[in-house]
Amino acid sequence: MTASPATPTLPRLARPLGGARFLGKHTAMLVGGGIVACVILLAVFGPLLYSQDPNHMDFGNSLSGPSPQHPLGTDGNGRDLLARLLHGGRLSLVGPLAAITIATVVGIGLGLLAAWYGGLLDSLLQRLLDTIFAIPGILLAILFAASFGRGLTAPVAAMAIAFTPFIAQLVRSATLQEKTKPYLDAYRVLGFSELWIAARRLLPNIAPVVLAQATINLGYAVMVLGSLSFLGFGVPPPDPDWGRMVAEGQEAMQRGAYLPSLLPSLAMIVTVVGFALLGEGFADRLARRERG
Amino acid sequence: MLWFIVRRSLGFLASLFLVSIVIFGMIHFAPGDPLDLIFEGGGRTPEAEAAMRARYHLDKPIIVQYWYWLSDMVTGDFGRSIAYGQKVSTLILSHGSTTLALVLYTMVIIVTVGMVFGLVSARYPGIVDRSLLVVTGVATATPPFVAAVILIGVFALGLGWFPTFGEGDGLLDQLHHMTLPAVALAVAYVGMIARVTRMSVMDELARPHVEVARLRGVGEATILRRHVLRNAIPPIMTIIATRLGSLIGGTTVVETAFGISGLGSLLVRSVARRDFPVIQAIGLLIVAVFAVALILVDILHARMDPRLTLSKARQR
Amino acid sequence: MMPVLEIERLSIDLPGRDVKRPVLAEVSLRVAPGEIVALVGESGSGKSVTSRAVLGMYPPRARVTGRIRVDGIEVIGASRSSLRRLRREVAAMVFQDPRASINPLSTIGTFLTETLRAAGVDARQARQRALTLLEAVGIRDPRAAMDRFPHQFSGGMLQRVVIAAAMSTGPRLLLADEPTTMLDVTTQAEVLVLLRKLQQTHGTGMLFVTHDLELAAAISTRMYVMYAGRIVESASTEQMFADPWHPYSRALMNATPRLDPDAPPTRPIAGRPPSLADALPGCAFAPRCTARQERCTAAQPPLQTIGDRRVACVVATEGKRA
């Protein structure tokens, strides 16, 4: 009993890669999805399979190149790079995931409310979102770190707040588009409550677009949280995360060793590209489906 | 037009007001005595405590505290740095010029390189376009700190073409020192601008009035200038403005990586030292600059496109 | 006298697996100086492609054969500069949608003087010319209009501006591709009157492309009917309306609603016009033709000249003498 209304499309400005299609119709999505899957699998299972301790220091062996004992070499403190890379993956991903999940959930809630009920609620929300939007994400995270100290909680909370407006705006405009469509009136006439209509009929129709945007935002969040770790906020030492590793690697570079900085850098770039491709490939597919 | 500026300024002030509450609230959000937080970095002497109590009027109700703080800020009194002892306004001025230079240099790179890439991509579809898409795709995924470290590794340490830190003395030397930092900061945004330019130009090239102009015998150069480029600029401007905040935030990273003493690195150091007067001042400054930039872009937008009445200038 | 437009056996083919017939096949037509000729057909008949081809604009990746001469100048194979001169000074085109033709960010003044400036006229003279033309097409207060933007004008006014721009360089040939389709009926009439007036004043030849027979009747002295990329009939407008020979022309007449209360009821033509993916053995109209015979689908009916008329129909030419 599902009418199939057109799914709303992502506003063009929200797409960092500009919606490029490479070779085939689904290449972007598949490649992106593949990369993301690999990264997540490595992050989740890597540390379980590869049992070296990422924090075990061995000063005699610092900055050594790849060897049977340390397949990717060691960093300035003699810690195994592969182990740090794998563990770092966990820490570099868990923060963004948490932040974006919260932002998406809250964003959907706020956007739906604003679009559905309109009026004063909508204006207030717009004002609130504008305010959040006026503070650059990285700045907010730094400010939070200033107040709440080290650790992941503060930056993650800041990221969640910073990304909420993007999702909320998207949901709001998508809802406004869908709200007036006749298929929803059918339910109203049948006596279903507004809440039920919103949750069970409208939401599934806007969910794909929201998901696409959330994926792209995930890439951004990885970059921002990585930047924070680079600056010294976020994950406290000695635990590794890619941003921190790059910072440590910078010193190693002065001593002629490039792997300690290169590896986490590549890991970060590949991961972000993966999320971007996946998110945009998905958005493209949605747009194409709507065009019929 | 005037009415528009007034209205937007009011909106801007409202946002700034709300943001100031957040920034002010920073030291009160954390559980415990604000003084504990302020002096976490050390330097807790009775004089310093007294100074902080006076500065933040800590014995008064919080609303009053906020009021005093805000009115001080508005009259230009940003207090004194805990770490340096100097007036915050002096600190900001001395560090601000460096950051301003860095940001301007970066913007020049972003706009020129980005738009050129975008134009080339739009003009030569096929292998050129595809390759540029890959390049810009990777660029957009490269956060400034990664770019910074890679650039240092390759060009400073490896090839020795550029210095690894500092901001230099004198115009030419400064340019030399700031080049790698500016490029590092620019990388992520160049990709973005290139892609928006590409899409915008492709859109405009496909418009009927372009074909009609050709059919009327107007020269290619004129067509490119008046019918394509001029029409393609607004979305590009919008993207530059909306990402400006993120770019300014990026100065924290780049200045830290390259050891440049600008506002960004000052902010980072101040956070480590819990130097709240400085943190608050820089925070407000960044937000203010960003908001002004957004208003300016709106005005430019409206001037460029006669169809827009200023009330609907930009849709985010 | 040399015709102002001469198209000789123009054929345009597109590559591709899904393309089973040419876009244009052996199209020939002629416009004498000062003459208004109508090119009539449904959408997809190829009439717009024909008019664009006159200015040297072909569909992408098209293979073009035949000859097109505008005021003696060869179009097919012309050099870039020759083509540009042709477009600037010798021929001009008016399109269906005036809003799509003008850059929304440019003033009317800029639009009007663009072509003139490209032709080397200096700014002041060009502006003068533009003002004169705006008056001629009936725009009140031309001076103020020059500095306004397209969105400040109605469709009808904009079309007048477009016509003014087209006439600005004094072309010998005017191509009008459905210039009134997007306008309301009253404005349509006004624009038609304007076109006719200008054409007479300047002695410009005009090719008026339309799907509307009434319009064609109102403005032209000669008509060509196109179907599926071919000319199927040509005659003077009077002859065409009094006695259409080709079954398609006849069907078109019958399908046109008339205000005359005694007119027979309108009868739409059954079926739909062929797309490029439809391969058509023999006469393209045969599937929809009420006078269809066996031999119609056997071979392409040739365009036969009988008197001062031409028709491509084996059934229609039966019994008629050249």
Image: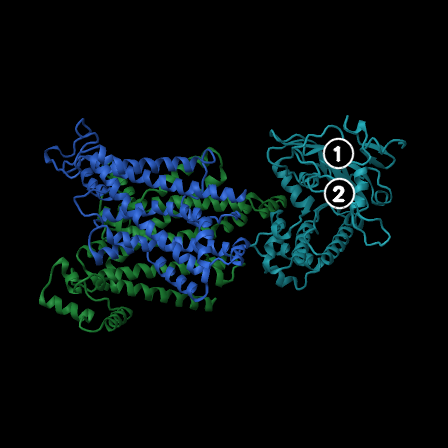
Chain colours: A blue, B green, C cyan
Q: What mark, if any, has residue C28 been given in the picture?
A: none
What x and y, as percent, mark residue B131? 42, 35
Same chain for labels 2 and 1? Say yes or no.
yes
Task: Residue C152: tell me if it is visible.
Answer: yes
> Is residue A216 depicted above or below A198 in this figure?
above
- Residue position marked by numbered label 2 in the rendering: C40
Q: Residues within 10 Å of mark 2 (few under 14, many from 20)?
A: many
Seen from the viewer's position, the closer of residues C227 and B165 is: C227
Q: Quadrant of residue B29?
A: bottom left
Q: Quadrant of residue B162?
A: top left
What x and y, as percent, mark residue A80? 18, 34
Task: Residue B162: tell me if it is visible.
Answer: no
What x and y, as percent, mark residue C224? 78, 40
Write the residue at 74% across / 33% down. C284
Q: Earlier in the sequence, mark 2 or mark 1?
A: 2
Seen from the viewer's position, the closer of residues A106 and A4 is: A4
* In this rendering, position of residue C16 left or right of residue A184: right
Residue type at mark 1 is: Pro
Residue type at mark 2 is: Val
Q: Residues within 10 Å of mark 1 (few under 14, many from 20)?
A: some
State the separation of the CA atoms marked 2 and 1.
20 Å
Write the residue at 20% across / 69% down. B56
- Residue position marked by numbered label 1 in the rendering: C287
Seen from the viewer's position, the closer of residues B13 and A241 is: A241
